[in-house]
Image (cartoon, rainbow, N blue to C red):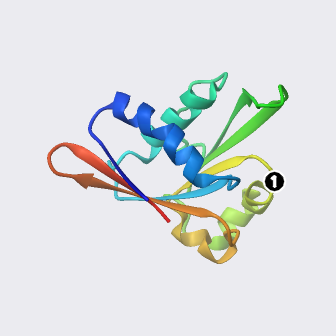
């Protein structure tokens, strides 16, 4: 599936459609060059879910967790991981990434290439790229 967005409000409009396309999948690998909007996508998804916290880039912390009220009225979690600075799979494992990849919560991973060998088989892959003029292309596989 593919979407094109040109503004933040466009992104807010397509997030429910992307959520529907994800189905029951909660693990999302985010691919894209610097500046293609990976963190902005996670912020919009969190906004749509109604997180208590304002999502921020985990570039330096590596992992940020956010909470929201799930459809059942219970507290639910979102893991937002940025592996840009990780050089070896073992470093990601030391972060506890395996637990986050196999728990029931949403987990968005920016720069997931290093952990591809341990991604769950049903993990969604979301590719973000620049589109002309001044837009973004989002492809879900």
Is 19 displayed left or right of 25 in the figure?
Answer: left
Q: Residue furthest bottom?
A: 117
Q: Position of residue 112 (x, y in %)?
A: 54, 64
Is 1 displayed left or right of 19 in the figure?
Answer: left
Quadrant (top left, top right, bottom left, bottom right) of the N terminus = bottom left
Within 10 angstroms of label 1, few (less than 14), some, or many (20 or more) residues?
few
Q: Position of residue 83 (x, y in %)?
A: 55, 58
Check the image and report above or below for 65 versus 36: above
Check the image and report above or below for 85 versus 14: below
Is 72 displayed left or right of 50 in the figure?
Answer: right
Q: Residue at x 49, y 39 (%)?
A: 15
The residue that disc 1 covers is: 103
Which type of secondary structure does the marked residue at label 1 adopt?
loop
Q: Residue at x 85, y 28 (%)?
A: 74
Q: Position of residue 36 (x, y in %)?
A: 33, 50
Does residue 36 appear in the picture of this structure? Answer: yes
Is 128 displayed left or right of 25 in the figure?
Answer: left
In depth, the one of 11 and 17 nearer the eye is 17
Q: Position of residue 23 (x, y in %)?
A: 65, 52
């Amino acid at each position: 599936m593919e979407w094109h967005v040109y503004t933040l409000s466009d992104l807010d409009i397509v997030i429910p459609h992307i959520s529907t396309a994800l189905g029951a999948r909660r693990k999302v690998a985010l691919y894209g060059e610097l500046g293609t909007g990976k963190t902005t996508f996670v912020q919009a998804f969190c906004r749509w879910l109604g997180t208590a916290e304002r999502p921020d880039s985990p570039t330096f912390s590596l992992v940020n967790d956010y909470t929201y009220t799930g459809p059942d009225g219970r507290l639910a979690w979102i893991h937002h991981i940025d592996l840009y600075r990780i050089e070896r799979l073992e470093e990601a494992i030391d972060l506890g990434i395996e637990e986050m990849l196999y728990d029931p919560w949403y987990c968005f991973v920016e720069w997931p290439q290093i952990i591809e060998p341990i991604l769950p088989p049903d993990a969604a892959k979301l590719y973000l790229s620049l589109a002309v003029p001044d837009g973004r292309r989002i492809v879900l596989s």
